[in-house]
Image (cartoon, rainbow, N blue to C red):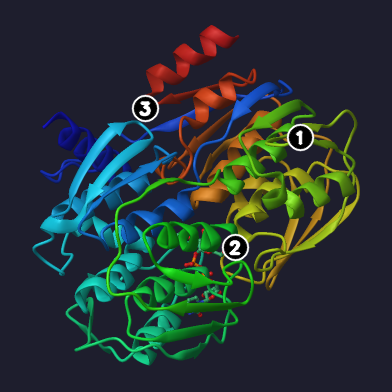
Amino acid sequence: RPSDRLLEEKTEEILGINKNGMRCPMEQYIIKGGNPLVGEVEIGGAKNAALGILAAAIMTDETVKIENLPDVQDINVLLEAISEIGAKVERVNRTTVLINGSGIGSVSVDYEYIKKIRASYYLLGALLGKYKRAEVPLPGGCNIGSRPIDLHLKGFKALGAKVKISHGSIIAQADQLTGSHIFLDTVSVGATINIMMAASMANGYTIIENAAREPHVVDAANFLNSMGANIKGAGTDVIRIRGVEKLHKTEYSIIPDQIEAGTFMFAAAATKGDVMVKNVIPKHLEATTAKLVEIGCEVEEFDDAVRVVASKRLGCTNVKTLPYPGYPTDMQPQIGVTLALASGTSIVTESIFENRFKYMDELARMGATVKVEGNSAIITGVEKFTGARVSAPDLRAGAALVIAGLAAEGYTIVDDIVYIQRGYENFEEKLRSLGAEIERVSSEKEIQKFKLRVG
Ligand code: UD1
């Protein structure tokens, strides 16, 4: 089927290899910096909400319609994994999908690519809740640091499941799940959503304390409730779930992606531009907006849009990443790049993941003055960056290096953009519509062609 082929191609693209093990050509971005970004940009659906919601969609045997899906690689790989275990996945269009989980023949996910997507762990909560058994490959390491899932497993155990790790997979099973009182030691988005899914189909009442409050936790809860679940308190740190026997069909539209939105807001700031970021929920962007205002941007809020204008050189600030409603770790590299061009010295402290400053070395190659000490980066702003060849260490840092390239003098090449494609839909098209000179290329010849064209 053409839709199957499309999924396969997308999967190959993200992994850089096709099913015969052949390497696909590596792609890069080539950027000519210096243009302030000006215009309007439309934000897609939230990737991190969609990952939880797609997994939850298999928890009913009826057909679920999900709209406003972002067309990004992580989502396409998860959809492929869902169809591999026997669910029917029909792509109505680029952003809408129909999922029917009645044909799931296996609770064992052995689809090899799923290991690359950390959020494959959501299939554990979904399958365990529905079938009381799940077998999912343990997600592999990740570039932003060690990412344990002990809290997810602790939650499943508290609900009465036996959990073991065997041959690289997590196997969770229970005769029946029973509601429980669960206290999360650390605020975890993934554990909160995963436990919420399993508890939705447990017997009795579950309370999750110290729950994550991120907008995508609320979105996943709203989605489950629209399927007949009984979840209260999502968005606060105590979530109460009364288990139900069955979930049913629903139609649901995913919230806008606050991180994609924030990335464009910082792109506007770093290039001294003027960008209207449309289809957002301004409330979800408050931590980002507050920092932009603090460093000297004008930010205007509308019902479902924010406009960011940077008309002068920006100033310094200190920032520390925290769980929502604090400043998001997924927006740390974007503010880091912007502060590296601001006047004065800033301190950026990363308190969620231990290895999220790798991009600083790349930024230094573009002329930034930065020093990383433990979980803080000390950044003394420079007047300008100069273009260089850099490589994307992970998804958000990759996007931040693109912002650096857009603000730099001359040409920047960003390697390893597969990371960026995991989470940003049509990134280069959206940037070009704001006046950026950026192109996706995969050969030296194409780089030369770009340089000849833009001069
Ligand atoms: C999600 C997001 C990711 C974002 C992160 C923090 C998805 C798919 N990804 O990741 O983009 O950067 O939230 O906002 O939604 N921890 C444990 N044990 C666990 C789980 C987490 O110790 O079992 C720790 C982590 O190491 C980390 C902190 O808790 O220090 C927060 O992680 P968590 O919120 O779980 O991140 P993810 O859900 O994986």
Q: Reading the chain from its start, which is encountered first: label 3 or label 2?
A: 2
Q: Amino acid at mark 3?
A: Ser
Q: Please identify, in this view, whether the residue under mark 1 or under mark 2 is nearer the observer.
A: 1
Q: Is residue 256 left or right of residue 318?
A: left
What residue is rendered at 65% in x and 52% in y?
333
User: Where 327 falls versus 252 (above or below)?
Assistant: below
Residue bearing mark 1: 302
What residue is rendered at 71% in x and 40% in y?
266
User: Where 413 falls versus 257 (above or below)?
Assistant: above
Distance from Cα at disc 1 to Cα at disc 2: 21 Å
The local crowd at label 2, few if under 14, some if 14 to 19, many if 20 or more residues have their Cα within 10 Å, is many
> Quadrant of residue 248 in the image?
bottom left
Distance from Cα at disc 1 to Cα at disc 3: 39 Å
Q: Amino acid at mark 2?
A: Glu
What residue is rendered at 59% in x and 62% in y?
356
Residue bearing mark 3: 442
Which residue is nearer to you in this view: 39 or 337? 39
Confirm whether residue 411 shows in the render.
no
User: Where 347 falls versus 3 (above or below)?
Assistant: below
Q: Amino acid at mark 1?
A: Phe
User: Where 125 falls versus 28 (above or below)?
Assistant: below
Residue 172, x across and y down, in percent = 24, 82
> Quadrant of residue 399 in the image?
top right
Residue bearing mark 2: 214
